[in-house]
Image: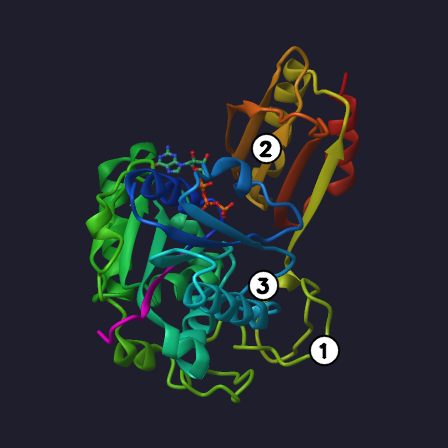
Amino acid sequence: MSQGLIPATILTGFLGSGKTTLLRRVLTEAHGQKIAVIENEFGEENIDNEILVADTNEQIIQMSNGCICCTIREDLRVTLATLAEKRRKGELDFERVVIETTGLADPGPVAQTFFIDDEIAESFLLDAILTLVDAKHAQQQLDSRQEVRRQIGFADRLFLSKTDLVEPAEVEALVHRIKHMNPRAPIQKVHFGEVPIAQVFDLKGFNLNAKLDIDPDFLNADDHGHPGHGHAHGEDCGHDHAPGEACDHPHHHHHDDDVKSFVFRSTKPFDPEKLEDFLGAIVNVYGPKMLRYKGVLRVKGMDRKVIFQGVHQLMGSDVGPKWAEGEAKQSRLVFIGVDLPRELLEQGLEGCLV
Ligand SMILES: Nc1nc2c(ncn2[C@@H]2O[C@H](COP(=O)(O)OP(=O)(O)OP(=O)(O)O)[C@@H](O)[C@H]2O)c(=O)[nH]1
């Protein structure tokens, strides 16, 4: 490895697969190491900010309003270049970078950034692409979502989350299927992100030749949108549209065209019982379409934030930190899914407010 290159790790995996849970564990365990984290969330609200414990050793950089593999890939390039420059000038101190992609990201173009841009290639070394696979939902996701297949195909190491929720035989069948898709990457079970740091960093796992097998155009910066190569969506779609806005490129599947997100906000507190009943009923009916939902809630009778989140029918909540001094006590809930019953959700949630 050339001296002075900053190791970078791409953390990927479908919506709700456990990326933030793993990252949080790693950041807690990596005490002493200074890690710059680039967080990219689908949807306009950054809830992961609230979930990740950011102590002073970490630089958490948020990149919202679009997906880094697509509409805001240039932002990723600029963010990385700025990080490297600040480090060179001594304005920022960190040893490595972790990029947490959105659950809908194709890791191909994200990884590509490290090779096709000279400035980035001179400062960073892509260490590995790590992919989280949700043992509870992966079979169904693999059937329906090409992003998941790409994330698994591109992985240098695979972490299987939520094996506690399924029978061992199901885990075995999933492992079998994944191995078939990516025989190179070691597969490892992780329970709520518990993984030794040595299995996450400095893997020197990124193998360019293997990526070129999956994607012969991997290093072609200008070869936009080449249908027929099995891309989840094109590298940079090359179309003019606002960040975060769907691109209607006709040639290939584009995640923005079927998955949508919206945010519900209110300064009124929620009645916890009403909310639980309502959401319980909603996920019973619409669970399959609800790919991911999460939020920070203001709840009646609680002086702390409630962090609420779910994936399909599985949901849960945790008591979060206290509201900061002077912080507006506002609930923010993000829903990500396919054909979400937005009006029903908004009206229902309004009805759960005190
Ligand atoms: N039962 C179980 N739940 C888990 C495990 N790992 C993560 N979860 C839960 O799964 C949910 C999603 O986890 P996150 O870490 O937020 O997933 P993510 O991939 O960061 O989600 P997005 O970034 O929103 O796509 C949370 O409620 C976690 O507590 C696990 O090993 N077992």
- Measure the C-alpha gap from mark 1 to mark 3: 17 Å
Q: Which residues are magenta?
A: 1-11
Determine which residue is flagged by label 1: 240
* Dot 2 beta carbon under 8 Å from ligand 1: no
Q: Is residue 339 visible?
A: no
Which numbered disc, 1 or 3, marks the residue closer to the eye?
A: 1
39 with respect to 135 (left or right): right
Q: Secondary structure at mark 1?
A: loop
Between residues 335 and 92, which one lies in front from this camera angle? 92
Colour pattern of the rendering: rainbow
Which of marks 3 and 2 precedes in the sequence? 3
Q: Residue at left 43%, top 50%?
A: 140
**Which of 88/231 is in front?**
88
Residue 38: horizontal and vertical position, in percent?
48, 56
Q: Amino acid at mark 3?
A: His
Task: Answer with mark 1 or mark 3, whichever residue precedes in sequence.
Answer: 1
Q: Disc 3 beta carbon < 8 A from ligand 1?
A: no
Callout 1–callout 2 Cβ contact below 8 Å: no
Based on the displayed image, in which of its 4 quarters is residue 278 positioned?
Answer: top right
How far apart are labels 1 and 2 at the CA level?
A: 36 Å
Outermost residue toward the top? 301
Is residue 321 within the magenta segment? no
Q: On the image, numbered disc 3 is attached to which residue?
A: 255
Q: Provide the residue designation for mark 2.
A: 283
Alpha-carbon neighbours of circle 1 within 10 Å: few (<14), some, or many (≥20)? few
For the residues carrying marks 2 and 3, which lies nearer the camera in this image? 3
Q: Nearer the viewer, residue 89 or 301?
A: 89
Left or right: 24 as drawn, with respect to 186: right
Q: Is residue 309 visible?
A: yes
